[in-house]
Image (tube, rainbow, N blue to C red):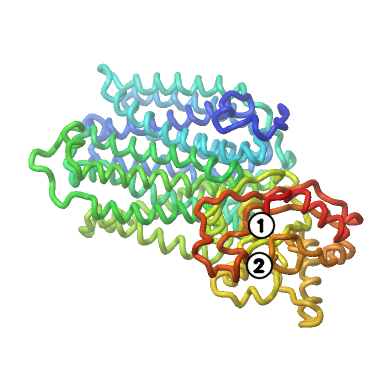
């Protein structure tokens, strides 16, 4: 495998497209998604407009049959695909899947020339198999070729590229279905795309298998349950999978209604369907791309609640922006449809749905990649693909039932948006980390502008003690927002009785402590809990001054850190906050949070992190000097 770069500023998400570590894989997955939708949509168009020449079944039944046949392999073969991706080099497996894709296009060509619907549906089933086999490779290979700070940008490119491929593949399939006197052009085009995908796959660097001796279990049912068990070992990973699956249910429900919505609600012609799909796709692409900038190139799960809020609000607004009556001259061409002001509000809602969908889904994919154990990662992603397919089927059945009972499409969108809010509240109640990260992210993007330096000194894994100066009541939130890992802070027990801030810190699993003269038992309990957390590999955050400064200067550091590392020897990471003295949450000119004049929107603050200190050198005096040097003259 080619070496990963060492510079942290050299690469951005777009420059990844110039690297061999990413570009061949990106082209491979893009062409695969394009080909899936080219063939699938071409077949749907043929069966919709030329059904009589292929079968006696009605078009509505044929199109749903085709959708079911394509998704069935995800249930049958995803578990096996996950095992193969953990057992075989993923680059080699990607090339084998591309060879299979070329063979499938050969089967499709045979079906067109034989004019056999059975053979064509068989090819569609095999194309679903191709996608199911490639799915675990698609996401499990990224952590092997990209650094942690590149994963957000890499996933953003993959997600936006996939939706663009779906869009142009769908358009190309519809066009090719009507080209010439014979639909065999579809298979020929598919073969060319598959060949191009195979050539691109030859450039993917090796991605060694984490479990080469894995014994493959071919039973899809027992292996699916086993893979879900791997995912459930980490609660956050499993709930992230449920969140992704819900997004695919939600998104697929909207996308499936676009043709009928465009015709019977907006009053547009066939081209209006493309307009809706393109608008949604551009939103997804932009939202995915913005994730890297908004998250500072690290996984920021605080964007997930932000995304879910947008998905709910703009889903609900689509109910009110949808026209109550059809235009008098319907069906309207795209140019005429764009002349109606109602159309622009609908398009804005669809764009915003895509935008916030990107905010929602990219961090969840990165979180799964980072927090899944490497030896199970592909199988966990396979479980994700199975649940995605299951949720989409459930969503399709629920939508069909609701529409069949007379529910208007706009109200269906509104019901889905309300369900989205309920699902979000449920997930965030089970894993408060999502909402807490959102509050922290909101704080440093709405009240402050945070400059961060030296974050690479915070260990990517394993235990450490972080020590920082204490300037304001929001110091832990600022530090937590900058860290890519959760931090358990040790904090004065009285803070837990404060409204809102106490609620936040309790859910951050903060460890309360009291001075020995006030509550010796609580102090001993706190030190025992710190030792247990460090033994579990957690990060511990401490403000060694023992309280918030009253004058902006550093107070004398207390010996608590020395006692902690004497019992559990771990690195001690010094860090310093700048710019918070004089803020609304500091004690300058009186009690904190009592002077609205101290609210300074978008004030610039800084967090500076130094190199770790060995446990034997972590004396209070030395740590105080290190923190003072990092802080400098700016309070």
Residue 486 is tagged as 1
Question: In percent of the image, x 52 and y 24: which residue is there?
Answer: 197
* Residue 31: x %, y % from top left: 48, 27
Whether residue 257 is situated above or below residue 547 in the rendered picture: above
User: Is residue 160 shown left or right of residue 459?
Assistant: left
Check whether the beta carbons of the residues at disc 2 and disc 1 lie within 8 A of each other. yes
* Residue 234: x %, y % from top left: 64, 58
* Residue 148: x %, y % from top left: 66, 41
Counting other residues with Cα less than 10 Å from the Cα at mark 1, is it few (<14), some (14-19), or many (20 or more)? some
Counting other residues with Cα less than 10 Å from the Cα at mark 2, is it few (<14), some (14-19), or many (20 or more)? some
Looking at the image, the residue that sits furthest to the front is 589
User: Is residue 188 shown left or right of residue 413?
Assistant: right
User: Is residue 467 shown left or right of residue 326?
Assistant: right
Q: CA distance from mark 2 to mark 1?
A: 10 Å
Asked whether the viewer can see residue 321, the reply is yes
Whether residue 151 is situated above or below residue 527 in the rendered picture: above
In the depicted view, which residue is nearer to us: 575 or 23? 575
Location of the N terminus by quadrant is top right
In terms of image quadrants, where is residue 85? Answer: top right
Residue 362 is tagged as none
Question: In percent of the image, x 31 and y 60: which residue is there?
Answer: 415
SS label for mark 2: loop
Question: In percent of the image, x 81 and y 51: which residue is there?
Answer: 626
SS label for mark 1: loop
**Residue at image mark 2:** 509
Question: In percent of the image, x 80 and y 71: which residue is there?
Answer: 527
């Amino acid at each position: 495998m080619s070496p990963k770069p060492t510079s942290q500023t050299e690469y951005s998400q777009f420059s990844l497209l110039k690297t061999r570590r990413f570009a061949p894989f990106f082209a491979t997955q893009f062409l695969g998604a394009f080909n899936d939708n080219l063939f699938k949509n071409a077949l749907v168009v043929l069966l919709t407009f030329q059904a009589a020449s292929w079968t006696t079944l009605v078009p509505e039944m044929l199109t749903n049959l085709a959708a079911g046949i394509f998704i069935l392999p995800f249930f049958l073969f995803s578990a096996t695909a996950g095992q193969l991706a953990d057992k075989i080099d993923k680059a080699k497996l990607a090339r084998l899947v591309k060879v299979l894709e070329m063979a499938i296009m050969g089967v499709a060509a045979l079906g067109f020339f034989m004019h056999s619907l059975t053979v064509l549906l068989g090819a569609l089933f095999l194309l679903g198999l191709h996608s199911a086999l490639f799915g675990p490779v698609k996401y499990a290979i990224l952590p092997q070729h990209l650094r942690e700070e590149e994963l957000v940008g890499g996933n953003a490119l993959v997600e936006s590229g996939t939706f663009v491929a779906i869009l142009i593949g769908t358009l190309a399939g519809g066009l090719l279905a009507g080209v010439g006197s014979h639909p065999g052009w579809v298979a020929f085009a598919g073969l060319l795309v598959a060949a191009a995908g195979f050539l691109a796959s030859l450039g993917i660097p090796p991605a060694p298998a984490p479990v080469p001796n894995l014994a493959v279990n071919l039973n899809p049912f027992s292996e699916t349950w086993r893979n879900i068990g791997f995912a459930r070992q980490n609660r956050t990973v499993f709930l992230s999978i449920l969140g992704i699956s819900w997004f695919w249910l939600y998104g697929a429900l909207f996308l499936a209604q676009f043709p009928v919505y465009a015709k019977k609600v907006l009053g547009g012609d066939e081209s209006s369907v493309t307009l809706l799909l393109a608008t949604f796709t551009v939103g997804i692409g932009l939202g995915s791309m913005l994730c890297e900038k908004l998250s500072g190139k690290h996984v920021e799960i605080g964007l997930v609640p932000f995304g879910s809020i947008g998905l709910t609000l703009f889903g609900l607004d689509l109910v009110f922006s949808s026209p109550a009556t059809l235009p008098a001259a319907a069906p309207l061409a795209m140019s005429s449809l764009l002349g109606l002001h109602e159309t622009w509000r609908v398009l804005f809602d669809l764009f915003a749905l895509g935008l916030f969908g990107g905010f929602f889904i990219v961090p969840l994919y990165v979180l799964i990649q980072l927090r899944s154990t490497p030896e199970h990662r592909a199988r966990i992603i396979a479980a994700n693909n199975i649940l995605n397919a299951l949720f989409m089927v459930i969503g399709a059945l629920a939508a069909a039932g609701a529409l069949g009972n007379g529910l208007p499409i706009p109200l269906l969108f509104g019901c889905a948006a309300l369900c989205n809010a309920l699902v979000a509240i449920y997930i965030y109640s089970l894993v408060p980390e999502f909402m807490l990260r959102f509050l922290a992210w909101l704080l440093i993007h709405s009240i402050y502008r945070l400059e961060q330096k030296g974050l690479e000194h915070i260990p990517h894994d394993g235990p450490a003690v972080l020590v920082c100066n204490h300037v304001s009541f929001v110091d832990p939130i600022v530090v937590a927002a900058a860290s890519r890992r959760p931090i358990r802070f040790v904090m004065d027990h009285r803070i837990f009785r404060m409204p809102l801030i106490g609620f936040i810190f309790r859910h951050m699993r903060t460890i309360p402590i009291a001075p020995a003269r006030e509550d010796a038992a609580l102090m001993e309990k706190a030190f025992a809990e710190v030792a247990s957390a460090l033994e579990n590999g957690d990060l511990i955050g401490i403000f060694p001054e023992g309280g918030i400064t009253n004058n902006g200067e550093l107070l004398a550091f207390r010996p608590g850190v020395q006692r902690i590392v004497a019992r559990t020897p771990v690195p001690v990471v010094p860090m310093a906050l700048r710019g918070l003295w004089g803020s609304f949450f500091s004690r300058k000119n009186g009690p904190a949070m009592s002077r609205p004049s101290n609210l300074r929107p978008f004030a610039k603050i800084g967090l500076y992190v130094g190199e770790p200190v060995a446990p034997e050198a972590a004396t209070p005096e030395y740590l105080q000097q290190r923190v003072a040097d990092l802080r400098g003259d700016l309070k």
